[in-house]
Amino acid sequence: MPTVRAAIVQRAPVLLHRDETMERVLAGLEEASGEGAALVVFPETYLPGYPEYIWRLSPGDDYDLSREIHGRLLSNAIDLDADDLQPVQDAARRAGTAVVIGVHERDGAFSRATLFNTVVTIGPDGRVLNRHRKLVPTNPERMVWSPGDGAGLRVVETPVGRLGSLICWENYMPLARFALYAQGVDVYVAPTWDEGDGWIATMRHIAREGRCWVLGAGCAIAASDVPADFPDRDRLYPDPEEWLNDGDSVIVDPRGEIVAGPLRREYGVVFADVDPDAARASHYTLDAAGHYNRPDVFTLRVDRTSRRQVAFEDGDGRQAAAPSANADILEI
């Protein structure tokens, strides 16, 4: 495959404001594609912004405030079935660019009151190629998102090769990483809220372990970026100069060498030329799911059944477990 350009957009969202943040998504996509990017990546839950406030709220004393904020988040979440992501899909199609973007997902077919931390991969024709829901929300994130399922643990074909994605600390789950390696991932995308030298070292390790390109998409945001109408803003964010997240978006080649970034405490777009064939050739010395694997010793079983398929109405209209025959099982 030919070498293509990839980009990570690192700009602050308008927290809890879907429409305003959507405008920033479209502007970032236009800027990156205008510079020749065939793949444009945005951070974890960029629409409508990572819930940084959960690390500041007290579960007891701030219960009413937490409920108010969560209500706003629900109202600004993304329902793919309701075409809430259609503006991004249309823009991707016009630009002929693949897009990976993190969203707060509200699934009307499952529950209108439950949210998922979801990363969506959109093809250059505007179609949704994959929807992956974070398997394990981290620490207080469990007050915001339901655990996801394995339906999105898939690698899909894109203009930059075979692409897969894990969200933030999912990248510390060895079996989840292996599931992508075993599907021949060339470009490994990691939308995240994490940052710093430790996280960058993780991105480099994954590139060396998986012999793949790694795009770590961070979110730079300062307290001054939090909208004025955010509930109890002055108490939660008293110092407008505070950086809530440094960003640290980075692109790493299959040898584990940083080729772009990290972009720290800045807003901008990180670009790199990505060669999928370089990832494939790098497996000559190490293929964690191939010649450097022992399938006679180790076996990984991945249940990729969608949560949407786990329940159905029986003859009496009651919810019951789906038949096991409907399960989507990947044996590695």
Image: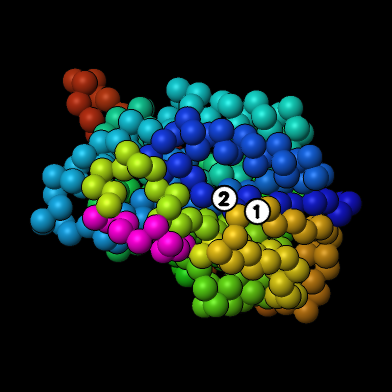
Helix, strand or loop at label 1? It is strand
- Compared with 60, 25 (above or below) is above
Q: Along the horizontal axis of the image, is 104 left or right of 178?
A: left
Q: Residue at x 59, y 66 (%)?
A: 264
Furthest residue to the left?
A: 61
Residue carrying label 1: 268
Query: Is residue 159 magenta-colored?
Result: no
- Disc on the earlier residue, 2 or 1: 2
Image quarter where the C terminus lies is bottom right
Residue carrying label 2: 11
Q: Residue at x 48, y 56 (%)?
A: 221
Query: Is residue 239 magenta-colored?
Result: yes
Furthest residue to the right?
A: 2
Q: Along the horizontal axis of the image, is 278 left or right of 122?
A: right
Residue 179, percent across and down?
A: 56, 60
Residue 96, percent across and down?
A: 76, 33
Q: Amino acid at mark 2?
A: Arg
Judging depth in this view, the residue of 212 and 195 nearest the camera is: 195
Q: Can the viewer see residue 150 in this picture?
A: no
Check disc 1: other Cα within 10 Å, few if <14, some if 14-19, many if 20+. some
- Compared with 274, 18 (above or below) is above
Q: How many labels, in total?
A: 2
Q: Tell me where the magenta segment starts and ends, as one range.
A: 235-245
- Compared with 100, 78 (above or below) is above
Q: Amino acid at mark 1?
A: Gly
Judging depth in this view, the residue of 35 and 125 nearest the camera is: 35
Helix, strand or loop at label 2? It is loop
| Disc 2 to disc 1: CB gap under 8 Å | yes
Q: Residue at x 48, y 27 (%)?
A: 84
Judging depth in this view, the residue of 288 and 2 nearest the camera is: 2
Q: Along the horizontal axis of the image, is 244 left or right of 30?
A: left
